[in-house]
Amino acid sequence: MHTITLKAHAKINPSLDVLAKRPDGYHEVRLIMQLIELHDLVILEWNAAEEAAAAKEDGAERLQIRLTCDAAAIPCDESNLAWKAAMLLASRMEEAGKGYPCGTLRIHIEKHIPMAAGLAGGSADGAAVLLGCSALWETGLDLSALLEVGARLGADVPFAMMGAARVNAQLGMTEDPMAATCAVGEGTGTALTVLPPVDAHVLLAKPPIGVSTKDAYEGIDAILGLDGKAPADPLPGRPDIDAVILALNKHDLFSAREKMGNTLELYTLKRYHEVAYTKCKIQECVQNGAALMSGSGPTVFLLAPDVQEVQRAFDATEGIQAQRIMTRTIL
Ligand code: ATP
């Protein structure tokens, strides 16, 4: 039996822009992703079947998955991204002529990342399973090949894998050029280029609602006129992602913060007053800099150069209806 325990970190988006809707229904985006300290733990236990027993079984029966999670709201069946990740990698091994893995895989998720929060918690778990199983099953696939498998699981998965590869030394990938904690994503968000990390303390505030990423992207079509009709209102400015990248390259958090933005706020803030209220309350507590929504929401985050500013904002927002977490970016 072999076991591996991996940290599956959440991300925030220090900018996100929606550029176009493609004929296949996916959106062209440009977004910055930054790994933060907040993480789930993913514990994998692999028990390979005896060769003779494995030979008798066929198809998916050869791989038995047992998934558990300490959070009751998380589905522990084949709809969980961790489960899907294991199945996907098993098929990829077979495609590559390496043989389908035979045995029992136990996955336990210790959940700390709020669910449906815009923090990509499910993607982080899926990413950890892809990398962890690749090590347990000795696939021999390098990080670039594994990132391609991850893109089939979900748009946020490849970045989560880059982050997991960087922070989990036992995977032996920390020095891979694609192992990183900050990146800019293009296309559907999976064409990734490494960026210097945002060095900041972070306050997260998640109002007690979930936002469906699918609904947010559908909602933004009408607002931006991506559905072929002219937008109802004149559009406010988009985030200046090139300027944010320039500032990050100079390690200039203040300039970067000024240029950040999230186009999906046009939908989520209008549709969910709880998110608009949370953003407004955090913004009231800071002298310079701004609060921004992560992904499609509802989590709003504040980036600050020192922990005191984050602590002040944490204390000042005690009364708001939101789960607040103090964390920091990973460099
Ligand atoms: P994203 O920013 O990528 O859209 P999110 O943070 O908004 O992600 P998640 O927490 O990843 O959202 O999960 C959203 C949905 O995915 C939930 O409805 C949940 O049922 C499902 N899901 C599947 N696997 C997991 C998992 N391992 N952890 C959390 N949610 C999961």
Image (cartoon, helix red, strand yellow):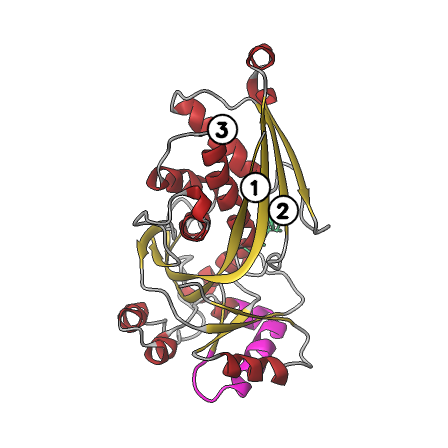
Looking at the rendered structure, the kind of residue marked 2 is Ile
Q: Is residue 16 left or right of residue 100?
A: left
Asked which quadrant contains residue 300, the reply is bottom right
- Give the Cα distance between marks 1 and 2: 9 Å
Judging by the rendered image, the residue that carries numbered circle 2 is 109
Compute the Cα span from label 3 to label 2: 20 Å
Some atom of ligand 1 lies within 8 Å of the CB belonging to the residue at label 3: no
- Disc 1, SS: helix
Q: Is residue 115 visible?
A: yes
- The reply to whether discs 1 and 2 touch (Cβ–Cβ < 8 Å) is yes
Q: Main secondary structure of the magenta part?
A: helix
**Residue kind at label 3, given as amino acid type:** Ala
**Among the two numbered marks 3 and 2 on one chain, the one whose residue lies closer to the N terminus:** 3
Quadrant (top left/top right/bottom left/bottom right) for the C terminus: bottom left
Residue 16 is covered by the magenta coloring: no
Q: Which residue is mark 1?
A: 82
In the image, is the residue at mark 2 within 8 Å of ligand 1 by its beta carbon? yes
Q: Position of residue 196 (x, y in %)?
A: 32, 64
Residue 307 in the image, given as x and y percentages of width and height: 50, 78
- Alpha-carbon distance for marks 3 and 1? 13 Å
Residue position marked by numbered label 3 in the rendering? 90
Is disc 2 placed on a helix, strand or loop?
A: strand
**For the residue with label 1, is its CB less than 8 Å from the closest atom of ligand 1?**
yes
Q: Which residues are magenta?
A: 268-290
Q: Amino acid at mark 1?
A: Ala
Of marks 1 and 2, which one's residue comes earlier in the chain? 1
Query: Dividing the picture into quarters, in which one does residue 240 lie?
Result: bottom left
- Which residue appears farthest toward the bottom when viewing the image? 287
SS label for mark 3 = helix
Whether the residues at callouts 3 and 2 have beta carbons within 8 Å, the answer is: no
